[in-house]
């Protein structure tokens, strides 16, 4: 009997997939209806307050009424009702974003409303949530680490490079690795081991399309073995991504080493249907002018990024983004 059951295990798993898919669709449908309900309540409150028919006292009385009418329901407090009004007013005139808010949870919508001041930033995080299925904690970390600002700065600074090599557009100019627990005087080996120990968070910082393939990944060239610090595969780009870790400032010779690794990967590891391998040098700091000179004649799809072990200063990063945006505007003008 046991042997017969084993023969049907794959069939059982196929049916489980059907069940799980249906459950996921049901959850999404429930969430969509919940967001739509909040939207409609927010619209009603917005119109009533705009016409001075309702004030804060009426909204509080309305919340008390709802809690008595639906004692088991959550999310109907006066504070949350005011948030529904803000939610509606934030997106009501934006035909591009209003459909997107219905695809993520209310908690994530609240985080985006609280953490974003522009439609561009809201669009960035809405699409990020939808693409990666972020939970509240994951989204909160990305907003706290100012992922939008860092991505915009990176794209602006490397506009020509990304235009020439679109694959590196998935990589950024700077990464925040505050979750790594490394000793004070850490070395590259300590950094690598800590990344492996916190791999899930590391991949979240880079993007969920990255799949880990190995640390100190061995490539053999001639009779010599070489070891790439970290090797990933990016599903969206259909290519291998080699990451070299450097404790210290970027040096031009780092690029030559990575170029060599990418050539080895493309010749001996990459599959025929995959795109050319991409490289990232992750260092403690870098001089952008030195990076520009070093990469000016390089044909390899490579990005040089720095990392920090603490969350960035919001004011400094915002000012830097504004400065770069204004500089680009002046150049274009």
Image: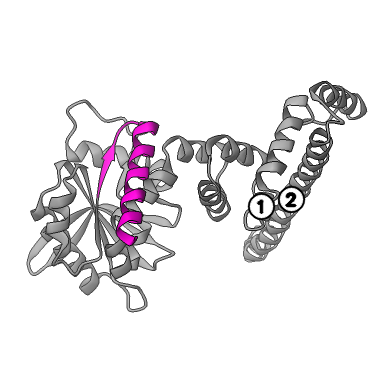
What residue sits 75% from the left and 53% below the top?
Answer: 29
Residue 121 percent location from the top left of the image:
51, 47
Residue 52, quarter of picture: top right
Q: Which residue is mark 2?
A: 32
Question: Which of 20 and 150 lies nearest the eye of the viewer?
Answer: 150
Is 313 included in the stretch rendered in magenta? yes
Residue 227 percent location from the top left of the image:
17, 55
Residue 66 percent location from the top left of the image:
88, 28
Q: Residue furthest front?
A: 333
Q: Which mark is residue 103?
A: 1
Q: Which mark is residue 63?
A: none
Q: Residues within 10 Å of mark 1 (few under 14, many from 20)?
A: some
What residue sits 32% from the left and 79% below the top?
Answer: 272
Secondary structure that dominates the magenta span = helix
Is 174 included in the stretch rendered in magenta? no
Q: Residue furthest right?
A: 69
Q: Are marks 2 and 1 in contact (CB under 8 Å)?
A: yes
């Amino acid at each position: 009997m046991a042997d017969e059951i084993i023969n049907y295990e794959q069939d059982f798993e196929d049916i489980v997939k059907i069940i799980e898919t249906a459950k996921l669709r049901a959850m999404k449908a429930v969430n969509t209806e919940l967001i739509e309900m909040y939207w409609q309540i927010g619209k009603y409150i917005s119109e009533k307050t705009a016409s001075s028919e309702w004030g804060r006292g009426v909204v509080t009385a309305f919340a008390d009424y709802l809690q008595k009418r639906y004692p088991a329901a959550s999310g109907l407090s006066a504070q949350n009702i005011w948030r529904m009004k803000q939610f509606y007013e934030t997106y009501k005139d934006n035909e591009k974003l209003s459909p997107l808010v219905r695809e993520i949870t209310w908690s994530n919508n609240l985080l985006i409303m609280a953490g974003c001041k522009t439609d561009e930033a809201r669009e960035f995080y809405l699409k990020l949530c939808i693409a990666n299925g972020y939970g509240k904690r994951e989204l909160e970390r990305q907003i706290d680490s100012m992922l939008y600002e860092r991505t915009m700065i990176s794209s602006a600074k490397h506009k020509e490079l990304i235009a020439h090599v679109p694959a590196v557009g998935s990589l950024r100019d700077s990464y925040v690795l505050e979750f790594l627990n490394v000793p004070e005087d850490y070395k590259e080996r300590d950094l690598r081991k800590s990344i492996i120990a916190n791999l899930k968070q590391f991949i979240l910082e880079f993007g969920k399309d990255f799949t880990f393939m190995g640390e100190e990944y061995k490539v053999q060239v001639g009779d010599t073995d070489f070891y790439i610090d970290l090797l990933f595969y990016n599903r969206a780009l259909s290519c291998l991504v080699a990451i070299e870790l450097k404790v210290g400032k970027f040096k031009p010779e780092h690029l030559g080493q990575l170029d060599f690794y990418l050539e080895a990967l493309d010749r001996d590891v990459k599959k025929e249907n995959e795109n050319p391998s991409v490289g990232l040098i992750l260092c403690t700091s870098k001089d952008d002018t030195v990076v520009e000179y070093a990469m000016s004649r390089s044909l390899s799809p490579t990005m040089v990024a720095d990392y920090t072990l603490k969350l960035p200063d919001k004011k400094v990063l915002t000012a830097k983004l504004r400065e770069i945006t204004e500089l680009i505007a002046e150049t274009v003008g």
